[in-house]
Amino acid sequence: MPQPHTPRLRVCAVSYLNTTPLVWGMLHGPQRGLFDLDFQIPAACADQLASGAADIGIIPSFELTRQSLEVIPGAGIACHGPVRSILLVSARPAGEIHRLAADSSSRTSVQLARVLLERRFAAEPELIPHTPDLDAMLRIADAALIIGDPALRIEPSRLPYYVYDLGKEWVEMTGLPFVFAVWAGRKSVITPGVVDAFQQSCRFGRERIEEIVAAESGRREIPRDLVREYLTHRIVHELGPRDYEGMDRFLEYARPRAPSA
């Protein structure tokens, strides 16, 4: 008797460069064909999990304050210092920012900017969602938050503005790593086999960075040397206890405050 077909898990991945090593095994290695992959911006992956359109997604870590999800351990997106792809570009010092135009494709990055401006610079600017267009953003606001590939296409040293790398600012403020995103899903689908597949896909990608550099640099219009530097020295994909300690600290700071009595 034929066996009933078991649908493959639906996995929402992110279309940014920083996610590429995580899914390289699913695209080109032993994990190919195990999952149905869909590529979106981080906020859209979170929304797909919330709606049930995806079983597992790479979600902004801030989403863990909004949804009850099981985290797949050992693989994600973090930094241990300057990250280069989360830039706060400002016409004035950070403590004087009153209006911030923010690319809201990643809720974690927006919340990180809010936390850092409040706790490190004593600023509480108005947040204005905007597409990642630096000139247009700075026409309507004091500062702009640019993230992901658009940030990598900017050369900070050539800008006539204050530029703050939010990975650097977080690590200097807390002494802890920062976790931008994690794989997560409903508890019922996070089996040991799924955890192993995601960890092995990450390892497969980390061992083939030169393949990724060759494949992604031209397609994304980011210089090869910067892609290599970014993936080998700026972004951390294999997460350990210290990374999760940093994530917990961020979630503590970012979690919405209960209204005062």
Image (spheres, rainbow, N blue to C red):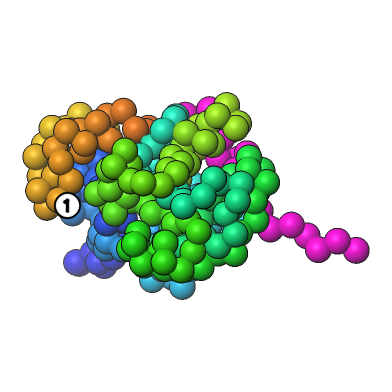
Query: Where on the picture, by quarter, is residue 175?
Result: top right
Q: Is residue 77 left or right of residue 22?
A: right
Q: Is residue 226 left or right of residue 110?
A: left
Q: Is residue 188 left or right of residue 228?
A: right
Residue 92, compared with residue 171, is above or below; it is: below
Residue 257 image offset from top left, x and y in percent: 74, 57
Residue 174, compared with residue 26, is above or below; it is: above
Q: How many marks?
A: 1
Q: Nearer the viewer, residue 259 or 31?
A: 259
Residue 235 image offset from top left, x and y in percent: 35, 35
Q: Is residue 114 visible?
A: yes
Query: Where on the picture, by quarter, is residue 14?
Result: bottom left
Amino acid type of the residue that numbered disc 1 sits on in the rendered structure: Arg
Residue at x-position 50% and y-position 59%: 142
Residue at x-position 29% and y-position 54%: 150
Q: Main secondary structure of the magenta part?
A: helix
Q: Is residue 243 visible?
A: no
Residue bearing mark 1 = 220
In the picture, the quarter occupied by the C terminus is bottom right
Q: Residues within 10 Å of mark 1 (few under 14, many from 20)?
A: some
Report if residue 54 lies within the magenta region: no
Q: Which residues are magenta?
A: 239-261
Report if residue 256 lies within the magenta region: yes
Q: Nearer the viewer, residue 163 or 106?
A: 163
In the picture, the quarter occupied by the N terminus is bottom left
Residue lying farthest to the right in this orientation: 261
Residue at x-position 17% and y-position 52%: 220
